[in-house]
Image (cartoon, rainbow, N blue to C red):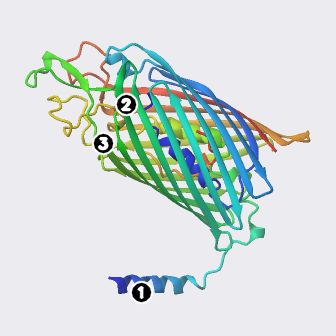
């Protein structure tokens, strides 16, 4: 089993070694647009999460972008 | 008392991996929000104030003050014959980020206080950019410690310990598309049920017409859950973006849940931004949930729950957000923004009956459903 894992890791690494970052810094103007943010209002995003988590059984896995403010 | 304090840790973990798309310090800002929830006989409103200040381009410090003013005459309260009640919850958060090269280290704490529940959460996080800054990997851990009390019973004092572990991966896929994956493991140990909530059981197991009785819920003392979420966002050829997300949730209480969300963001006349969102959520019920039990619990391992959040149900949310932003010609601020957000949520329960409806045989009452409106007004200054 360990040999198999090592083999998979080796193949994966050698396959990835030729891959270079495919989006250059000067190609990121659209990504920098505020409309691309998952949550533009962190206070409101955290509050919305709170509304759901108080009324649904599920929790977590929603990402940090929406609550990245230290606010609830 | 609120049903859960999980979200304290969630918010704090979010803080500790603040900007998932790139390892940079968060934007300096001040936000003042008024929030209001109105649905199912419950009204919650209050303010939230956030201030974030950066120092020497390597340190960011933020503080948040948040209040919930709760007025509840929910179906649970009315059905149990209890009186409507009001209470207030106050919460303070303090957090700091330190940027070192392509790494962002974060720490924070939150304390929450209400008359029968006290919660403290401590969080640590780190995120790292690599692969030409196309990839950001983040890790977070939060420890929550809650103390549970019961109004009118000075002898009641219980506690909960909570651990959150999170891994996040953000990836720039194309010049117009980003992806965000998150996995979160949460464990709880302690007093996990609500001391005020009851389940119901038949007075005579062989005769539903004899009616039912209430008894205090009996919950397991541990809970472990896994959640994995994937989000995508794509910039359209015009000044707009579409987004989609999916989350799968499962726990050892038997609840499985799926969440889908679609969003569309559109910039109007440079200064106005419109957001339209649709969210769909569905879950199965916990193994020990029933709307009506045949017999009462026999011992502390014979679990009983009638919390509708543990039942099988679906909800759908329709959202409309509108914000207006303009530059400021003052020394201490760059921009100001005003946002209004409205969410309309429909809840439909498959196995939770409305006991406020009278004239029905026990176990044949109408299934419960309700609509809720959520309002948020936010004033923001970016500096």
| Mark pair 3, 1: CA separation | 43 Å
* Disc 3 target residue: B221
SS class of the residue under badge 3?
loop
* Disc 1 target residue: A7
In the image, residue B48 lies at what x, y percent?
64, 32
**Chain of residue at mark 2:** B
* Disc 2 target residue: B157
Residue under the image location 70 percent in, 61 percent down: B99
Query: Marks 3 and 1: same chain?
Result: no
**Between B227 and B281, which is closer to the camera in this rendering?**
B227
Which of the 4 image quadrants contains residue B374? Answer: top right
| Mark pair 2, 1: CA separation | 54 Å
SS class of the residue under badge 1?
helix
**Chain of residue at mark 3:** B
Q: Is residue B317 visible?
A: no
Sequence-wise, the earlier of marks 3 and 2 is 2
In the image, residue B131 lies at what x, y percent?
64, 74
Left or right: residue B77 versus residue B128 is: left
Q: Nearer the viewer, mark 2 or mark 1?
A: 2
Which of the 4 image quadrants contains residue B214? Answer: top left
């Amino acid at each position: 089993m360990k040999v198999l894992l090592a083999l998979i890791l080796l193949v994966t690494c050698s396959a990835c070694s030729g891959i270079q970052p495919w989006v250059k810094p000067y190609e990121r103007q659209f990504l920098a647009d505020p409309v691309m943010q998952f949550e533009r209002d962190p206070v409101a995003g955290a509050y919305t999460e709170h509304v759901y988590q108080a009324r649904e059984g599920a929790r977590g896995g929603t990402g940090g972008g929406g609550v990245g403010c230290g606010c609830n | 008392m609120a049903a859960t304090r999980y979200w304290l840790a969630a918010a704090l973990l979010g803080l500790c991996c603040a900007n998932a798309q790139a390892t940079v310090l968060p934007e300096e800002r001040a936000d003042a929000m008024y929030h209001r929830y109105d649905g199912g006989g419950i009204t919650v409103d209050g303010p939230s104030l956030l201030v974030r200040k950066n120092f020497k381009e390597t340190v960011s410090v933020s503080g948040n003050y948040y209040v919930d003013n709760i007025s509840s005459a929910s179906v649970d309260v009315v059905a149990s014959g209890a009186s409507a009640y009001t209470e207030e919850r106050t919460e303070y958060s303090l957090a700091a980020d330190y940027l070192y090269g392509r790494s962002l280290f974060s720490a924070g704490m939150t304390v929450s206080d209400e008359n029968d529940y006290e919660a403290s959460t401590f969080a640590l996080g780190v995120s790292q950019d690599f692969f030409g800054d196309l990839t950001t990997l983040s890790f977070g851990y939060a420890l929550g410690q809650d103390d549970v009390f019961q109004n009118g019973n000075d002898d009641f004092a219980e506690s909960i310990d909570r651990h959150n572990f999170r891994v996040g991966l953000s990836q720039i896929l194309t010049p117009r598309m980003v992806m965000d994956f998150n996995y979160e493991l949460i464990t709880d140990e302690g007093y996990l049920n609500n001391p005020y909530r009851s389940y119901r059981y038949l007075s005579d197991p062989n005769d539903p017409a004899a009616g039912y009785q209430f008894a205090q819920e009996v919950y397991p003392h541990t809970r472990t859950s896994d959640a994995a979420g994937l989000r995508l966002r794509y910039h359209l050829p015009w000044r707009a973006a579409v987004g989609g997300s999916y989350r799968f949730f499962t726990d050892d209480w038997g609840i499985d849940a799926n969440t889908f969300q679609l969003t569309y963001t559109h910039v109007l006349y440079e200064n106005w931004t419109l957001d339209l969102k649709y969210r769909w959520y569905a879950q199965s019920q916990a193994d020990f949930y029933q709307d009506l039990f045949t017999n009462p619990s026999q011992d502390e391992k014979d679990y009983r729950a009638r919390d509708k959040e543990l039942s099988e149900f679906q909800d759908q949310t329709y959202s409309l957000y509108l914000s207006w932003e303009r530059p400021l010609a003052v020394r201490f601020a760059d921009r100001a923004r005003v946002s209004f957000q409205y969410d309309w949520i429909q809840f439909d329960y498959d196995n939770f009956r409305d006991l406020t409806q009278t004239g029905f045989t026990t176990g044949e009452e109408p299934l419960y459903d309700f609509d809720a409106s959520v309002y948020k007004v936010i004033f923001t200054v970016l500096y």
